[in-house]
Amino acid sequence: ADRDSKTVVADDIVRVIHARNGRFLKAIGDEGWEEVDNITARHKVTHYFRGMRERRLKREARNGKEKAAAPRKRGTEPLEKVRNGKASPPSFLEETGEFGSG
């Protein structure tokens, strides 16, 4: 998928999370947390998916695969699952600690 379509998907995920009363937060030193703007939230979503692809490749290499699969050009299968209602964004974004609800 091209960059513009990935941005649209990431924006959709941010909207879905906000619609479910979820928030994207960043740590403020010892002071606690603050909610970030939509652009930063979108960056958090796209960063998560890049990291997810890298973790998958490392896991495949660790599990004895002779050759780890190259990153998929499309790279949006998890995003498409969210858009199609087959996955819940909070369930997988929560793992990174980048997603807070409240």
Image (cartoon, rainbow, N blue to C red):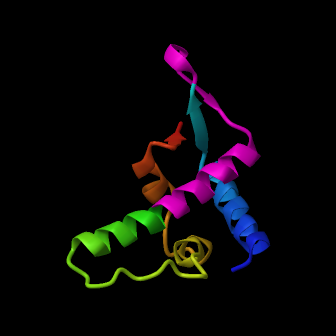
Q: Position of residue 66 (x, y in %)?
A: 26, 85
Q: Position of residue 65 (x, y in %)?
A: 25, 82
Q: Residue at x 75, y 71 (%)?
A: 3
Kindly indicate the quadrant of the structure image that contains residue 45: bottom right
Q: Is residue 57 left or right of residue 81?
A: left
Q: What residue is rendered at 75% in x and 74% in y?
A: 5
Q: Position of residue 13 (x, y in %)?
A: 64, 61
In-image side of 7 versus 28 (left or right): right
Residue 85 to residue 90: above or below: below
Residue sitting farthest toward the left: 64
Q: Is residue 41 magenta?
A: yes
Q: Is residue 50 magenta?
A: yes
Segment colored magenta: 28-51
Query: Viewer-proximal residue, 59 or 80?
Result: 59
In the displayed image of the protein, which residue is found farthest to the top? 31
The quadrant in which residue 35 appears is: top right
Q: Nearer the viewer, residue 21 or 53?
A: 53
